[in-house]
Each structure stands twice: as C-alpha cells, then as structure tokens.
Image (spheres, rainbow, N blue to C red):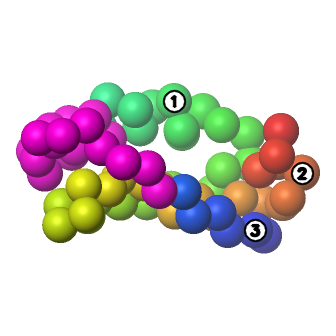
Amino acid sequence: MITVLVTYKLRPGTDRTAAKAQSEAAAPRFRALDGLQTKYFLYREEEGLGGGFYIWESREKAEA
C-alpha cells in the first residue's frame, strides 16, 4: 500500500459548496482507477487549497 497527498490552489472565490460539487462530479472517474483503494477530497478555505489523499494498492498502480 502507498499513500499520496496532492494539494493545489483553487480558483479565487471557490467556496465549500462549489468545491463539493466539483468533487462529486469527479468521483466516478476516481472509482474507475485500477488499484485506487480510497480517495479523500480535501478543502482548505483559509488557504484557498483543494486536494486529495489517495490510498493505492501499490506504488506501481499509483504511478501507472
């Protein structure tokens, strides 16, 4: 198992409601990824950051 943490700057003005809607729209694509066991969507309003915490079966699957 391997974990990956990714963060990125959100577009200015992206509030929690918009970030949640974007996450829900993207979720089916992540469910289809081979080897991805779990993904948590992240949102930090104060810093204007979004991101994801991923748990993969293996490093090979994460890098594929």
* Label 2–label 1 contact, CB within 8 A: no
- Residue 20 at x, y = what percent? 21, 45
- Residue 56 at x, y = what percent? 71, 59
Measured in 3D between alpha carbons, the distance from the residue under mark 2 to the one under mark 1, in whole angstroms, is 19 Å
- Can residue 6 be seen here? The reply is yes
* Residue 12 part of the magenta-drawn span: yes
Segment colored magenta: 7-23
Disc on the earlier residue, 3 or 1 = 3
* Image position of 25 with respect to 19: above or below: above
- Can residue 38 be seen here? The reply is no
Question: Helix, strand, or loop for circle 3?
Answer: strand
Disc on the earlier residue, 3 or 2 = 3
Q: Quadrant of the C terminus?
A: top right
Measured in 3D between alpha carbons, the distance from the residue under mark 3 to the one under mark 2, in whole angstroms, is 9 Å
Residue identifier under label 2: 60
Residue closest to the eye, 40 or 6 = 6
The residue type indicated by label 2 comes to: Glu
The residue type indicated by label 3 comes to: Ile
Disc on the earlier residue, 2 or 1 = 1
The residue type indicated by label 1 comes to: Arg
Residue at 17% of width from left, 66% of height from top? 46
Mark 1 packing: few (<14 Cα in 10 Å), some, or many (20+)?
few
Residue closest to the eye, 14 or 59 = 14
Q: Quadrant of the N terminus?
A: bottom right
Residue closest to the eye, 34 or 41 = 41
* Label 3–label 1 contact, CB within 8 A: no
33 vs 1, left or right, is left
Residue at 11% of width from left, 41% of height from top? 13
Circle number at residue 2: 3
Question: Helix, strand, or loop for circle 2?
Answer: helix
Residue at 66% of width from left, 37% of height from top? 33
